[in-house]
């Protein structure tokens, strides 16, 4: 659809020439970008959505939750569908590619995916240490290609996510130093639980007041190559467990945080959601909480500007 692509490029050009951030969202379906901005007071970029069974199913979640555009985090099995979705709605979707990094051909697969249009890697959710040789090969390649990596950090077994993944967040500063040119995006329960200095890696969603000085807070402050994906129950739980702390955290890291949903509901209103999305749309729940905690300028950075800048989307 050359008409849509031309228009998108034109808007990027306007933005570059004026230095003003112009929302690039324009829908061929007749839903205006302004309307999407209306519901939340800002256009919204969901940096963490998994493709649905159909192209229209993915679009239904965006339209229902008031989201302007989304990153489809896509494993190999859904890659063709993600390509179709981006091709059908190029102003609404971009895509990342992911694979289990313990697969022998993992690096080749991701390199090919990047050539074919993936604009980042993730979510990477592999049953290895975050500092393992398999992951370090990925970090090196991501730096070479200048593409970001979204990592699922999980230290505790969960019924909905059995096992542990990319373990060792508390020592991840070693990787942040070793790969200064790699853009890391942290996600999942260990990432958000570790905002609190007392996280003992014994539960997925700790509650109650946060003890200042946790590694996630420190690493975000100390390392320019680390960003945060606020999706899922993990990000939502962090915002809700100690809202006063969360508001100060948002202010501190307002240029590093990005809204994401990881929601599994069908319609952006909670229908047919599984696990943490049962009976609610996590996109809506987290946007509502962010709007409560963040002043308008910080909210817009987190739900729109930071993701667009970082992903060049
Ligand atoms: Zn995840
Ligand atoms: Zn939802």
Image (tube, helix red, strand yellow):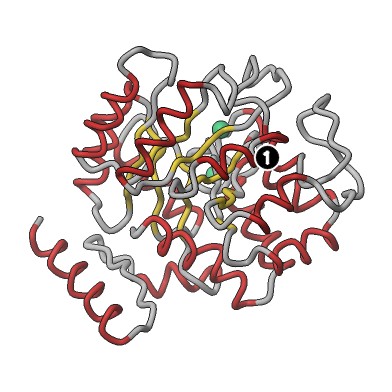
Give the percent coordinates (x, y) of residue 85: 26, 42
State the residue lying farthest toward the front.
178
Residue 4 placement (x, y as % from top left): 16, 63
Question: How many labels were placed on the picture?
Answer: 1
Q: Which residue is outermost to the bottom?
A: 18
Foreground residue among 268 and 206:
206
Q: Which residue is mark 1?
A: 191
Q: Residue at x 65, y 19 (%)?
A: 164
Task: Describe residue 224's horizontal placement relative to residue 96 as left or right.
Answer: right
Residue 142 x/y as whole percent: 37, 40
Q: Quadrant of residue 154?
A: top right
Q: Nearer the viewer, residue 182 or 49?
A: 182
- The quarter of the displayed image where residue 272 is located: top right
At horizontal 90% and vertical 49% (from top left) the residue drawn is: 211
Q: Foreground residue, 230 or 81?
A: 230
Q: Between residue 256 and residue 277, name the one nearer to us.
A: 256
Q: Report whether 205 appears left or right of 211.
A: left
Name the quarter showing ligand 2: top right
Asked if residue 87 is positioned above or below residue 53 in the image, the reply reads below
Give the position of the N terminus as an image quadrant. Answer: bottom left
Q: Residue at x 46, y 59 (%)?
A: 307
Percent coordinates x, y for residue 96 in the rendering = 36, 40
**How would you rate the neighbour count of disc 1 (Cα within 10 Å): few for under 14, some for 14-19, many for 20 or more?**
many
Q: Quadrant of the C terminus?
A: bottom left
| Residue at (66% x, 34% y) in the render | 276
Image side of residue 108 versus residue 215, left or right: left
For this orientation, the residue located farthest to the left is: 2
Check disc 1 and report its element: helix, strand or loop.
helix
């Amino acid at each position: 659809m050359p008409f849509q692509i031309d228009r998108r490029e034109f808007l990027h050009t306007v933005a570059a020439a004026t230095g003003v951030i112009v929302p690039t969202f324009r829908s061929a379906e007749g839903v205006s970008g302004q309307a999407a901005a209306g519901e939340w007071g800002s256009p919204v970029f969901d940096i963490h959505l998994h493709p649905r069974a159909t192209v229209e199913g993915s679009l239904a979640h965006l339209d229902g939750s008031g989201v302007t555009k989304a990153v489809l985090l896509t494993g190999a099995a859904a890659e063709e569908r993600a390509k179709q979705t981006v091709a059908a709605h190029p102003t609404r979707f971009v895509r990342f590619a992911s694979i289990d990094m313990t697969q022998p051909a993992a690096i080749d697969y991701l390199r090919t995916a990047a050539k074919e249009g993936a604009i980042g890697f993730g979510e990477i959710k592999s049953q290895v240490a975050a500092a393992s040789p398999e992951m370090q090969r990925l970090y090196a390649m991501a730096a070479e290609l200048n593409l970001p990596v979204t990592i699922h950090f999980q230290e505790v077994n969960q019924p909905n996510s059995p096992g542990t993944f990319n373990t060792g967040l508390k020592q991840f500063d070693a990787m942040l130093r070793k790969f200064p040119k790699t853009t890391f995006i942290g996600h999942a329960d260990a990432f958000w639980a570790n905002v609190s200095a007392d996280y003992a890696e014994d539960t997925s969603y700790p509650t109650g007041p946060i003890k200042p000085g946790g590694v996630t807070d420190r690493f975000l402050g100390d390392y320019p190559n680390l960003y945060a994906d606020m999706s899922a129950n993990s990000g939502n739980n962090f915002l809700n467990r100690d809202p006063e702390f969360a508001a100060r955290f948002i202010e501190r890291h307002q240029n590093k945080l990005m809204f994401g949903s990881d929601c599994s509901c069908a319609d952006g209103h909670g229908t047919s959601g599984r696990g943490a999305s049962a009976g609610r749309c996590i996109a809506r729940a987290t946007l509502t909480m962010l709007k409560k905690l963040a002043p308008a300028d910080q909210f817009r950075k987190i739900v729109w500007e930071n993701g667009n800048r970082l992903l060049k989307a």
